Image: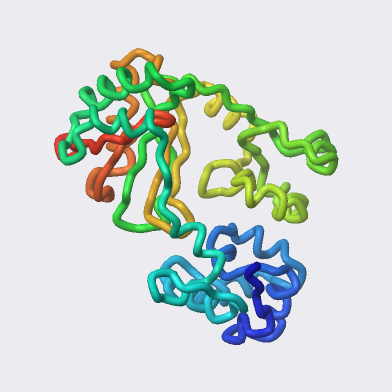
Amino acid sequence: MTKINWDSLYNDLPTHIAQALRTARMKPEQIITKEDGELMAIEGIKEEDVNTIRAIYSNENIEGVHKATAEATMETVEVEGTPVAASTRKALAPRKRSDKYTRMTKSVKKDELYSVESAVKALTALAKSTKLKTVELTLNTRETGLRGEIKLPHSTGKEVKIAIFGDKVITEINDGKINFDILLATPADMPKLARFAKILGPKGLMPNPKSGTVTDNPEKRMAELAAGGTLPYKTEAKFPIVHLALGPITQKSEDLVDNINDAIKSIGVSKIKNAYLSCTHTPSVKLAISNI
């Protein structure tokens, strides 16, 4: 089992910040995934401390972040002669695919760029042999930190549970119940929400102004999101990748094509290196996006 030598971490930060992060058992890689409000929820971390932390532990210094964890790791193993953290060994192991998946790959032209229309057609055929049929768009972007909201021309067909922060939500969270996919709050609610950051943050449910979930009019925002054509997006915390679930492959093909095209246009073709479309448990096909 990999152990962290916490005393060797965060010596590049002021003492009170380092001690707070060590006490909270917050690893450097975890810092990157946390919203500012989640960091401020750690006892001993103040608003002005967040900028100090971000200056060193951020996506822009990802190599340094990994190095800090590696140096504090008590146990290592060798992978092809190179020492790596033991916790990394599992991630480096090759993934074994099922026979059915392997058969499906034979019908996909790996080196071909598919138009959105032909990609949807190909996935529709492949999805006939799968139970879960959610269409997934994966975008490799040119930078991290991209986030926003897409107004799609058609519903994604996905039912989203939306809640507005209040006494009922507080009771449910305290009881260990999370009955929502999106939580809306007003700016005045944020101090009350800080104590739930450790619960909501890892689940991606912490309200944030950048994602439009902190608003002066949560009722109006709920109506917009419930309409089904509004889709928030953001790159992963550590990597310039955006994942979008665009609904079931059983939707009308033309509606799916419209939604995919609009999603790519909204994020911006110039910000995207390449794009892949897949359905749950199927191989992906690479999209031709230069003419979108």
Q: Nearer the viewer, residue 133 or 244?
A: 133
Q: How is the image coloured?
A: rainbow
Residue drawn 69% across and 71% down? 46
Quadrant of the image containing the C terminus:
top left
Q: Is residue 233 above or below residue 248?
A: below
From the viewer's perspective, tell me whether residue 250 is left or right of residue 253.
right
From the viewer's perspective, tell me whether residue 214 is left or right of residue 176.
left
Q: Nearer the viewer, residue 183 or 122?
A: 122
Residue drawn 57% across and 32% down? 221
Quadrant of the image containing the N terminus:
bottom right
On the image, the x and y values in percent for residue 87 come to 56, 65
In this figure, what is the number of numbered marks?
Answer: 0
Q: Nearer the viewer, residue 27 or 214?
A: 27
Q: Is residue 62 above or below residue 265?
A: below
Residue drawn 37% across and 32% down? 101
Residue 267 falls in image quadrant = top left
On the image, the x and y values in percent for residue 13 come to 60, 83
Residue drawn 57% across and 77% down? 52
Residue 116 falls in image quadrant = top left
On the image, the x and y values in percent for residue 285 come to 26, 35
Q: Is residue 52 above or below residue 141?
A: below
From the viewer's perspective, tell me whether residue 289 is left or right of residue 264.
left
On the image, the x and y values in percent for residue 163 come to 68, 32
User: Is there any visible trace of residue 200 in the rendered image?
Assistant: yes
User: Is there any visible trace of residue 151 in the rendered image?
Assistant: no
Q: Nearer the viewer, residue 74 or 265?
A: 74
From the viewer's perspective, tell me whether residue 115 is left or right of residue 74.
left
